[in-house]
Image: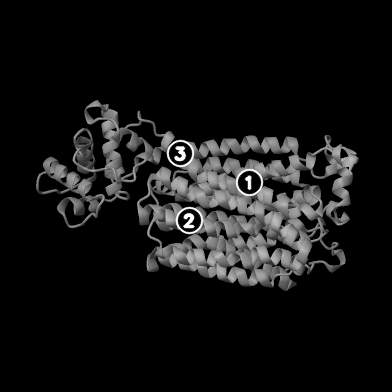
């Protein structure tokens, strides 16, 4: 005991460093869902093309899973994680610089390819640096970083997008900013009805248009832009509109509190434009469109810094770290199967994986859980906008909540899988968290179409996210339990299939939405989680991929 008290804590530093990498991983991965409406309008692509861009990440991520996991096993997690981090940060910068669908698609694809090795590499670090009995908790801490980054991504992205569009930003419309002239034509001529709370705004805009254009109203992009610019200068334009019930972004709320006669011309124009954008969200380019590129540039440069920090702090094996002492080495190695401290082989175990029923069940668990979960980081912001009219900053907060609370599900799940394995064995210690715990996910997703408010839906999706992430440490531990020396390749194999599914899911959801509306999208997620529960319960962590390398049963803590 005295020796243990004198031991260094370098293993904690390694886990913290891997967790920090996971924060940046998800920050880059998730932010595009929050910015997608501005990206679409800026680059000039439609929802179908954007669904392909969102899915491109997961397809590339899937293709890179097994090779990148093997590369980390072959050349060491320190070198490869650094390469992966530098790569995804550079491609994140490329996304911020994209000018059309093809460059955006390519940059997003390469981002996914460079992120593919992150979690297999982190799993390998956990296996080498942590005693076997603590794998679940350590894996949960690393995954917590990912979910924490994912939770912060939407919230931070919403704030930064608005912050990068200061009051000095010009509000004038150009002809190229008029995206759908027919929507203006229909509203101004009264052939399209706008429901409250936006009806009074629409009527005001229509009346002012008629004063500007006369009764013929033969609108063109140029005449529409000119009319809007003239209208926006009137400080009394919306003075009779009750805006107290409108879901306005923070800068519009602040301007609303200023008496009309005390507003500057810039404040008047900004407030009027933001209200008009609420009536015509797809017909004009949004003012905040100028904020998405600098926001993504910030994330890219931050990732480059963290990649350099990882290289400085991490080492492949405990014995190679200059700061570790013998007491900590003894503590780590006494608690591990000796095979965990060996380098990987030169071959990816394709045939054993193909022939293993157990690994196919494990892979299907990843497939179905990703199909249900990917809604949170791709389409949830647009869903909140289109169904409930939630403004950008509040969307950022709402989409943050499920991922934020899910991160604590990871920590609890890591502790739980270790305790369950100690009491009931690895078979049920892993199957309960990533199988049985999916049943509440089914109920939560199925309830969403019936819920009356945006916050009620957020609450249901939070339950789904917590229960989903409760099982992730057990997923990592399952791979570590069954894979022998091939942890990187095995977890990469399962993640590959899971991310193929995640890559196809946004496009499939686009088709479901087109045909069945948002309810169809939510029901499809519920079905996916039901299938996930079945295959998770059938998976067996006591069945090794390589029986000759079977590790000892989990120790009792």
Marks 3 and 2, how far apart at CA: 22 Å
Badge 1: few (under 14), some or many (20 or more) residues near its Cα, within 10 Å?
many
Q: Earlier in the sequence, mark 3 or mark 2?
A: 3
**Mark nearer the viewer, 3 or 2:** 2
Q: Are marks 1 and 3 in contact (CB under 8 Å)?
A: no
The label number, if any, that marks residue 159 in the structure image:
3
Q: Are marks 3 and 2 in contact (CB under 8 Å)?
A: no
**Mark nearer the viewer, 2 or 1:** 2
In the image, residue 96 lies at what x, y percent?
Answer: 49, 41
Asked where in the image residue 222 lies, by quadrant, the reply is top left
Residue located at (39% from left, 31% from top): 166
Quadrant where the image shows the N terminus: top right
In the image, residue 404 lies at what x, y percent?
Answer: 55, 48
In the image, residue 230 lies at what x, y percent?
Answer: 20, 35
In the image, residue 124 lies at what x, y percent?
Answer: 76, 52
The label number, if any, that marks residue 459 in the structure image:
2
510, above or below 85, in the image: below
Q: Is residue 53 left or right of residue 556?
A: left
Badge 3: few (under 14), some or many (20 or more) residues near its Cα, within 10 Å?
many
Q: Is residue 196 left or right of residue 468?
A: left
Marks 1 and 3, how far apart at CA: 21 Å
Asked where in the image residue 226 lies, by quadrant, the reply is top left
Residue located at (69% from left, 60% from top): 475
Q: Which residue is mark 1?
A: 145
């Amino acid at each position: 005991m005295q020796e243990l008290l004198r031991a260094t804590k370098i293993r904690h530093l390694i886990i913290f460093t891997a967790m920090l990498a996971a924060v940046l991983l998800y920050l880059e991965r998730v932010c595009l869902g929050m910015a997608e409406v501005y990206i679409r309008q800026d680059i000039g692509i439609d929802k179908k093309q954007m669904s392909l861009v969102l899915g491109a990440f997961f397809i590339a991520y899937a293709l890179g899973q097994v090779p990148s996991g093997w590369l980390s096993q072959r050349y060491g997690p320190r070198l490869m994680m650094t390469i992966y981090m530098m790569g995804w940060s550079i491609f994140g910068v490329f996304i911020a610089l994209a000018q059309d669908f093809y460059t955006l698609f390519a940059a997003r694809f390469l981002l996914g390819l460079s992120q593919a090795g992150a979690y297999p590499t982190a799993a390998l670090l956990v296996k080498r640096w942590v005693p076997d009995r603590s794998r679940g908790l350590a894996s949960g801490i690393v995954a917590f970083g990912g979910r924490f980054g994912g939770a912060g991504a939407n919230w931070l992205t919403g704030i930064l997008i608005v912050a990068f569009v200061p009051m000095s930003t010009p509000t004038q419309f150009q002809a190229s900013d008029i995206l759908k002239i027919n929507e203006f034509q229909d509203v101004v001529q009264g052939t399209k009805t706008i429901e409250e709370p936006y009806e009074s705004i629409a009527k005001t805009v229509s009346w002012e248009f008629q004063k500007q254009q006369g009764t013929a109203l033969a609108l063109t992009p140029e005449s529409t832009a000119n009319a809007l610019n003239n209208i926006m200068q009137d400080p009394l334009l919306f003075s009779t509109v009750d805006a107290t019930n409108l879901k306005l972004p923070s800068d519009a709320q602040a301007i609303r509190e200023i008496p009309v006669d005390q507003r500057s011309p810039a404040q008047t124009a900004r407030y009027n434009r933001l209200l008009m954008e609420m009536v015509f969200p797809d017909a004009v380019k949004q003012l905040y469109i100028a904020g998405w590129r600098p926001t993504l540039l910030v994330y890219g440069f931050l990732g480059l810094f963290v990649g350099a920090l990882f290289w400085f702090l991490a080492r492949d094996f405990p014995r190679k770290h200059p700061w570790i002492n013998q007491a900590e080495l003894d503590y780590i190695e006494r608690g591990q199967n000796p095979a965990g401290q060996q380098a990987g082989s030169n071959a990816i175990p394709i045939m054993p994986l193909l022939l293993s029923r157990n690994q196919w069940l494990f892979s299907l668990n990843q497939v179905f859980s990703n199909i249900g979960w990917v809604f949170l980081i791709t389409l949830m912001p647009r869903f909140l906008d289109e169904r409930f009219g939630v403004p950008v900053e509040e969307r950022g907060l709402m989409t943050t909540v499920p991922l934020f609370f899910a991160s604590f599900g990871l920590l609890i799940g890591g502790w739980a899988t270790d305790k369950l394995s100690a009491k009931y064995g690895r078979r049920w210690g892993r199957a309960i968290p990533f199988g049985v715990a999916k049943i509440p996910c089914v109920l939560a997703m199925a309830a969403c179409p019936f819920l009356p408010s945006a916050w009620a839906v957020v609450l249901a999706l939070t339950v789904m996210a917590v229960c989903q992430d409760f099982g992730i440490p057990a997923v990592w531990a399952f791979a570590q339990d069954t894979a022998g020396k091939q942890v990187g390749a095995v977890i990469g194999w399962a993640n590959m299939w899971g991310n193929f599914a995640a890559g196809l899911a946004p496009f499939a959801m686009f088709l479901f939405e087109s045909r069945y509306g948002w309810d169809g999208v939510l029901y499809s997620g519920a079905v996916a989680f039901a299938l996930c529960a079945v295959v998770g319960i059938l998976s067996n962590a006591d069945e090794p991929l390589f029986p000759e390398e079977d590790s000892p049963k989990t120790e009792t803590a």
